[in-house]
Image (cartoon, rainbow, N blue to C red):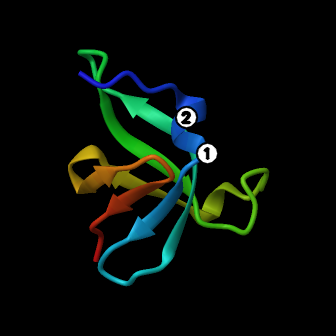
């Protein structure tokens, strides 16, 4: 079992392996009724401090391919 803090996840770059681009920054997580992470809330704006929530996107936990030391690799079309 891997123990991660939200702050650990927020410091990692999110790379989409389909496009090869930086997908955005993690601003929050959605937890299911069993206490497990269901999805990540991503700000696709330029800054993690953006107040415009319209640019937010969701990444389901199942779309995560690998969590590395510096990056999170996702597969999202």
**Residue at 46% over, 46% down:** 69
- Locate residue 15, reporting x and y percent: 44, 67
**Foreground residue, 20 or 60?**
20
Q: Residue at x 43, y 45 (%)?
A: 40
Mark 2 surroundings: few (<14), some (14-19) or many (≥20) residues within 10 A: few
Taking 36 as reference, is 57 above or below it?
A: below
Residue 5: image x %, image y %? 51, 25
Direction front: furthest residue: 69
- SS of the residue at dot 1? loop
The quadrant of the picture occupied by the N terminus is top left
Would residue 64 appear left or right of 7 to someone viewing this image? left
| Residue where numbered disc 1 is placed | 11
Answer few, some or many: residues within 10 Å of disc 1's Cα (few below 14, many 20 plus, some between 14 and 19). Answer: some
- How far is mark 1 from mark 2, CA to CA? 6 Å
1 and 2 marks in contact (CB < 8 Å): yes
Whole-percent x, y for residue 77 in the image: 28, 77
The residue carrying mark 2 is 8
Q: Residue at x 60, y 32 (%)?
A: 7
Residue 16 lies left or right of residue 8; in this view the side is left
Residue situated furthest bottom in the rendering = 19
Q: Secondary structure at mark 2?
A: helix
């Amino acid at each position: 079992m891997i123990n991660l803090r939200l702050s650990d996840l927020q410091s990692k770059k999110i790379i989409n392996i389909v496009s090869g681009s930086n997908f955005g920054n993690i601003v929050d997580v959605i937890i299911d009724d069993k206490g497990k992470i269901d999805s990540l809330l991503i700000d696709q704006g330029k800054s993690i401090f953006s107040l415009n929530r319209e640019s937010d996107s969701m990444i389901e936990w199942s779309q995560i391919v690998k969590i590395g030391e510096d990056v999170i690799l996702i597969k999202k079309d």
